[in-house]
């Protein structure tokens, strides 16, 4: 719908957008019907992780970089480990890879449930937060908290805790689940299915805003049948395919003054990462139950409505639960080789050979593709580091969406426009404090 | 009894400690019943600018804007709680203090660094008085509940002031020094139930140092195993770099 009210003036300034991770402001100014400013300001204080890593042992990197984000700490750990292992020339065992995939599945379920229920749902049912929902939708709130609790418990068993995992390190795991642990995990995962089905039914009952803006979607892609989260090349809906080592050709970061997180671009002036990007590129590889969920939810690829990222997250949560059930069952059947448990440390005994090298990790975090790159000297100390975070890759695209959306909704009241813009930004599930420390080497 | 008007705020951090609060599961609903939760930006759109009974603050002070915000929160809160390592010790953000600020700005932002001023990282108590401290990276839910009970009862919470080793021994872990690696358990404040060591990792010192560390004993352990003091001090910097700045320098 084009702008109907020529001559309209509008000033939206949302300071410290709520129900997102980190600090961001929405600024929109319309003067006499013309869009004069349309920005998503990132005002998070930078934490300079890449600069702090210099001089640190490559074996410490994952401990430090998981502190970039408390919500996707496991994805940061796993990306960091992948980069470190490449720099050191370590190839993980098949068992380690299976356990890592299981960990990433748990993280996706936890993060997507958090976003769908506690961050996005209030907007869709006209509430300010989950608190009023405790009275109006008690069963729904309890289900969300119960699902989170279960997944956290599973993460505790696997890696000690979900926020900043303890036992996932370079080379493998410092503890391994016992047969009894695996049996319980498998049972608890299967027991999550009814709540997951109820989640799909809930999301199917919600009305999402109609809006479309085609853009370039970027996610990991691969030639095998697995929905690629832990491994793959960089792929885009505009036909780009690059090895993960070439991530800087895909991201093209640049500093913009209004954001302590840098902006990125690939074939166009902006691209999107995250659940919708992954769905658009890899939907054929989803588990059958996830495909069925997509059908029930009416989500079809290619989908160009950013508000439906929340729907794509729901589909992925189903997929990750199914994959986790399969992986836990596989481990249970095959048995875990407990002799693979590692002793942690800064490699004090020099058991693991170190070398001067360079490694890149590329993993799908819940909010999109995440890159870490480390350069090490011959003592295994980091000399340079780079982290490119999903949210910063989405920032230019968010602004592109805002510029396209504002004229379409200009006839609405100022309060409605502001809410719609907040919902747009929230639909990307931004993780702002993660995104504010990006560097070009 | 009136439920205490309570808010959560975040300065520079990963927001993992607030997430731990949300991770309490259905217990969260019982917590919410005990308090009057008026602001929690990560999970709520409601805002509150008036007086507060209890303010939980996560994150460390890394620029002047954050210091001003913290003073403003302190000014309207009867009770201020430092939530997690970034708030209690400066946390991993404190590692920044080992570098020249202009230099790290240049490394990360190049010529764009002028847009993003930064300052020496400080823990909350280095800027304003703090009433309760919940250590840990991230915080542990049981300790959060204990502190909450103390706040509701109007009594102080005493953070355990013995070494992590005391808990680790009770958990019957094999000493990591006997497994050939260094661990900060001998000098780090307990209260986490040796969380990391129980999961096969070392103690990284996220709860800060005990007030009276047994330096002689630690040195003896290091010497007997041929480990240089520098190696351990370097590791302590991960969470304890802000300690060197001291409260007086923070003014």
Image (cartoon, rainbow, N blue to C red):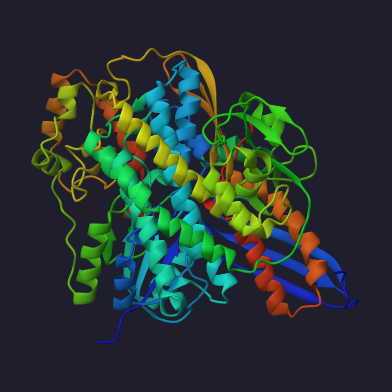
Q: State whether residue B205 appears in this view.
A: no
Image quadrant containing the C terminus of chain A: top right
Q: Which one is nearer the viewer's eye here, A38 or B22?
A: B22
Residue A192 drawn above or below residue A237 = below
Q: Residue at x 56, y 74 (%)?
A: A125
Q: Position of residue B57 (x, y in %)?
A: 39, 63
Q: Residue A13 location, x and y as percent?
A: 68, 70
Front position in the image: B140 or A276: A276
Residue A203 image point, x, y percent = 56, 63
The residue at 77%/47% (across/down) is: A215
Q: Say which quadrant the N terminus of chain A sits in.
A: bottom right
Q: Quadrant of residue A266?
A: top right
Return the x and y of residue A275 as percentages of the image width and height.
Answer: 60, 48
Query: From the viewer's perspective, is residue A207 above or below residue A294?
Result: below
- The answer, for residue B106, to whether it is visible in the render is yes
Residue A250 lies in what quarter of the image? top right
On screen, residue A28 versus residue A292, left or right, reads right
Residue pictured at 65% horizontal, 52% vertical: A259
Determine the residue positioned at 27% across, 16% down.
A349
């Amino acid at each position: 719908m084009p702008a109907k009210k020529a001559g309209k003036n509008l000033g939206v300034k949302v300071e410290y957008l709520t129900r997102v991770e980190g600090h961001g402001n929405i600024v929109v100014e319309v003067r006499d019907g013309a869009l004069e400013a349309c920005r998503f300001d990132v005002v998070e204080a930078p934490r300079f992780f890449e600069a702090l890593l210099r001089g640190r042992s490559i074996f410490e990197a994952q401990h430090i970089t998981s502190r970039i984000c408390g919500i996707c700490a496991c994805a940061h750990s796993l990306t960091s480990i992948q980069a470190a292992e490449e720099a050191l020339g370590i190839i993980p065992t098949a068992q380690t890879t299976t356990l890592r995939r299981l960990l990433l599945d748990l993280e996706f379920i936890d993060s997507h449930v958090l976003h769908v229920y506690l961050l996005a749902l209030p907007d869709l049912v006209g509430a300010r937060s989950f608190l009023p929902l405790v009275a109006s939708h008690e069963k729904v709130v309890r289900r969300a908290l119960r699902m989170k609790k279960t997944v956290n418990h599973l993460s505790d068993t696997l890696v000690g805790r979900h926020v900043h995992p303890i036992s996932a390190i370079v080379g493998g795991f410092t503890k391994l689940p016992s047969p009894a642990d695996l049996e319980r995990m498998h049972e608890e995962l299967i027991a999550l299915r009814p709540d997951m089905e109820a989640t799909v039914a809930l999301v199917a009952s919600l009305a999402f805003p109609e809006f479309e803006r085609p853009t370039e979607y970027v996610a990991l892609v691969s030639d095998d049948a697995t929905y690629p989260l832990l491994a793959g090349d960089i792929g885009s809906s505009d036909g780009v395919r690059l090895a993960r080592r070439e991530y800087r050709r895909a991201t093209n970061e640049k500093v913009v003054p209004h954001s302590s997180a840098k902006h990125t671009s690939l074939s166009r002036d902006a691209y999107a990462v995250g659940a919708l990007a992954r769905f658009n590129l890899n939907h054929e590889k989803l588990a059958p139950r996830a495909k069925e969920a997509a059908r029930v939810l009416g989500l079809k690829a290619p989908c160009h409505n950013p508000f439906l990222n929340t729907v794509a997250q729901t589909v992925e949560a189903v997929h990750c639960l199914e994959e986790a059930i399969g992986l836990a069952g596989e481990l249970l059947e095959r048995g875990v080789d407990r002799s693979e448990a590692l002793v942690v440390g800064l490699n004090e005994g020099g058991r693991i050979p170190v070398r001067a090298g360079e490694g890149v990790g590329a993993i799908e975090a819940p909010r999109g593709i995440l890159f870490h790159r480390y350069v090490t000297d011959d003592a295994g100390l980091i000399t340079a580091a780079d982290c490119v975070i999903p949210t910063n890759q989405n920032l230019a695209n968010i602004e592109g969406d805002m510029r396209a959306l504002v004229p379409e909704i200009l006839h609405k009241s100022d309060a409605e426009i502001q809410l719609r813009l907040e919902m747009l930004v929230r639909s990307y599930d931004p993780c702002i404090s993660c995104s504010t420390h990006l560097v070009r080497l | 009894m009136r439920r205490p008007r309570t808010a959560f705020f975040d300065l520079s951090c990963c927001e993992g400690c607030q997430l731990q609060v949300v991770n309490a599961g259905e217990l969260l609903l019982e917590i919410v019943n005990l308090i009057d939760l008026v602001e929690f930006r990560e999970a709520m759109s409601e805002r509150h600018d008036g007086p507060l009974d209890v303010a939980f603050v996560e994150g460390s002070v890394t620029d002047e804007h954050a210091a001003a915000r913290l003073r403003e929160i302190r000014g309207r809160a009867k009770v201020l709680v430092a939530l997690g390592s970034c708030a209690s010790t400066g946390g991993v953000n404190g590692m920044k203090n080992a570098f020249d600020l202009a230099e790290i700005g240049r490394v990360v932002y190049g010529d764009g660094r002028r847009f993003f001023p930064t300052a020496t990282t400080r823990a909350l108590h280095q800027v304003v008085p703090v009433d309760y401290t919940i250590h840990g990276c991230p915080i542990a839910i049981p300790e959060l509940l204990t502190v909450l009970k103390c706040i509701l009862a109007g009594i102080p919470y005493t953070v355990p002031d013995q070494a992590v080793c005391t808990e680790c021994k009770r958990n019957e872990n094999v000493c990591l020094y006997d497994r050939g690696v260094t661990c900060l358990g001998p000098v780090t404040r307990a209260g986490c139930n040796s969380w990391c060591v129980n999961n096969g990792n070392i103690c990284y010192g996220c709860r800060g140092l005990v007030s009276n560390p047994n330096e002689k004993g630690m040195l003896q352990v290091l010497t007997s195993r041929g480990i240089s003091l520098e190696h351990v001090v370097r590791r302590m910097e991960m969470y304890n770099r802000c300690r060197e700045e001291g409260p007086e320098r923070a003014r």
